[in-house]
Amino acid sequence: METLSALTAGTDVVASCDDLEGGKEVTIAATCTIESTEMSVKDAYDSLVHDRKILHSVTRIIFSAIYFVFFTAMLFAHIPTARMYEQAYAVSSSLATAGDETVTPSSPIKFFNIGQLGDVFDWFSNTLVPAVFVTQDQNGVDLPTEEWARVALFNKALGGVLIEVSRKSPVDCEADGSLYKLYPTCYDYQDLDSEYGAYLLPFTLNASDALKNLADWKTEKWIDVSTSEVMVSILTYNGELEGYVVAELVLEFHAGGFITPKSLTRPTISIPYGETSIYVKDALVAFWWVLAVLWSTAKVFWWRKKEESPSPYNVLKRLSGLVVVEGVVCAFYAVWISIVELLDDVDFQDSLWSLADPEGEDVEGTSDDIKALDTVIDVLKEIAYLTAALRVIGAVVIALMGLQILSRFRFHPQLNILTRTVASALRQFGAFFVVFIVIFLTFTIIGTMIFGDRAKEFSSLPNAMAACINMLFGEFDFDSIKHLQFSVAFYWIYMVVVSLVLMNMMLAIVLDAYEEVSSESYKQSANLAVADRIRTICWDLLCELQISACSRNAVVSRGKVRPLLLERVLKARLNEAALAMLTPQSLRNLFPDATLAEDEVLATLHHIEQGAILSRVLAAEDAEENTEQKESRRSLFKRHSKIGEAVRGADVLEVPAKATDEPTLMA
C-alpha cells in the first residue's frame, strides 16, 4: 500500500507567506525539486476535486450549525422560559406555600401542610384570602381599585377565585351482616348534577366580605365527608413580563381519610409578537428551511440520476430521511399558529375584557361571571397544553439538528469518534438492557410487596420504580425505610447487583467500544494527515471569502495558487492534449498575467501532490477494509454451511434409530 512517506522524497524548498492566522510567517515545504515535480493534469484535477468534496462536507456542517443557532434563537423568542419561570414561581410561592407544620397566629397553615378536613377551612380563611384579596399596600394605605388583588406585587388576579367542588353520592356499602351494621353508608360517583358545584369569590370584594362568603358556604356544607376533590383556580396577568398564569390548587380527598394537596402553575405568553425581532427570527428560520429543502431535493435528484432508475419508494425514503428536520419544523409552526389563533380568538378577548372591568362583576359572583372566568381559564389551559407540546417539538428539532451535525462529522477521522462509539455500543446494549430490565422490575416488585404498606416510596409500582432509580443514582433517602424489616438486606443486595455489577458492565461496554473505535481512527496511516488537510482547506476557505470581498483578481493565497481558481482553470483545459502534464512551467503558463514566484509554484504543486497521494491512500484503505469485510462474511457463510451440513447429517443418522424404536413403543 502506498503511504504518505512518499511525500518526503526530493529536496525541500522553504517559502514564507502571510498566514491568515495573525499574519505570522509560516513555512511551506515543497517536497520535490522543479525538475522532478510534475504530475498528470487529470491527477491534479482529481486531487482538487477531492479537496472540494471535503470543503462541501465542512460547508454542510457550517450550514447545519447556523440552522441550529437560528432555530434556537427563534425557540426562546416564542417560548421565553426565563420570563415564564419567573412569573410562575412568584405566583406559586405566594399561593402554594409550604413550611413548618406549626400553626400560630403569625404563621397560619400552609397549603402543603393540609392533611385533614378541618385544615381546609383554616387555609381558605387564614392563608388564601389574605394572599389574594389585597386592598392595602405594605404600609396600610388603601390601594386604588385597579391595583386590588395583586399576587406577589405584579401579578394582577382577574375575575375572582374559582372554587370547583366534586362530591360523591351516598350509597350502601357492599359489606354484609355485621360489617354492614358497622359501616352502612359509603360514597361513590353516580353521575348526578349535585356532584359538582362551582363557587366564585370575585375580586370586587375585600377580605372581610370574602371571609363572610366562605362562612356562608361552610354552613351550607359545601365541603364535607362526601367531597372527593376541591380545585381552586386563580388567573393572573403580569404586564411587566407580558404573560398569564393559571394557578390550580387541588385537594384530593382519599378514601383512607387523608388529603393530598397538589399545585400546578401554567404560565403562557399574552402577546405572541411583542417585539419586531421575533418576526426577523421567524424569517431567518423560514429562509434556512427553504434552503435545506432545496438542497435535499437537489441531492435526491442527483442520486436518482446517478442510480439511473431507482424505485419511487427508494426515492421517497431517501427524501424523507433528508427532510425529517424540516418536517418537524413544520409541525412546530403548526402548533405555534394554533396558539396565536387562540390568543386572538374573539370569544376569548370578549371574556377577558369582561374580567378586566371590575365594575361589570357582581359581588355575589353570578353564573355569567363564572362562565366568563371559566372560558378564559379553559382557553389558557389549552394554550398551556399547546405550549407544552411546542416545547417537546422544539426539543425534538434541537435533538435532530444536533444529531445531524454529529452525523456530518463522519468524514473527519477524529470528530466522528463519538458517533461511531455510540453506534458500536448500542449494538451491544440490546442483550444488556433485557437483563437490566428484568432485574430492575424484579427488585421493584419485591420492594412494593415488602415495604408498600408502610413506606410511601414503595406504596405503588410507579413510586417503587422512582425509588429504585433514585437508589441507582444515590438520591434515595434510606432513612425512610431503615426501620422496616428486611430494608438493609434489600438495599445492599440492590446496590451490589444493580449499581455495582450492572452499571460497571454498561461502562465496560462503552469503554470497549470507544477503545475499538479510537484505535481504528488512529491506526490508519492517512487519518492524521486527513485532519491536517481539513484544517488547511478550512483556512483556504476563509481566504477565499476574504478575496471574494476584497480582491477577486488575486491568484495567490496563503503562499500558493488559490485551489478553487486552479480547479476551474484545469477543468477548462482538461481535454487539451498539449497540457497532459502539470509542471512548474505549465503552471506558470496557466496564469500568464500573474507573476508566480518559485516558492509559490512549489507550494502549489506540493499541495496538489499531497492531496493526490492522500486520496489514493484513503481509496486503498477503503478497498482493503471492504475486502476484509467480504472475506469475513465469506468465511462466516462457509462456517454456517458446514454447521448446517453437520446438523443435516446428524438428522439422517438418527432416522434409522427412530424407525427401529417405533415398533417397540407400539408393542
Image: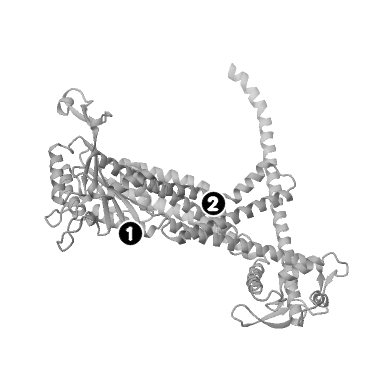
Answer left or right for 546 relative to 418. right
Q: State which tag comes first along the sequence, 1 or 2.
A: 1
Left or right: where 321 falls relative to 432: right
The answer to whether 353 is drawn above or below residue 617 in the figure is: above
Which of discs 1 and 2 lies nearer the camera? The answer is 1
Q: Secondary structure at mark 2?
A: helix
Task: Return the mark for residue 280.
Answer: none
Q: Residue at x 80, y 66 (%)?
A: 572
Q: Name the residue tied to disc 1.
A: 86
- Mark 2: which amino acid? Leu
* Mark 2 nearby-residue class (10 Å; few <14, some 14–19, many ≥20): some
| Any part of residue 452 in sight | yes
x and y, in percent, of residue 426 in the image:
54, 51
Residue at position x 76%, y 80% from top? 596
Q: Which residue is mark 2?
A: 426
Q: Does residue 485 appear in the picture of this structure?
A: no
Q: Secondary structure at mark 1?
A: helix
Where residue 576 sits, quadrant-wise, is bottom right
Determine contact: label 1, label 2, CB under 8 Å: no
Q: How many marks?
A: 2
Q: Quadrant of the C terminus?
A: top right
Which one is nearer the viewer's eye here, 457 or 85?
A: 85
Nearest the viewer among 490 and 323 is 323
- Three-letter amino acid code of the residue under disc 1: Glu
Tell me if residue 139 comes above or below residue 129 in the rendering.
below
- Crowding around mark 1 (Cα neighbors within 10 Å: few <14, some 14 to 19, many 20+) is few
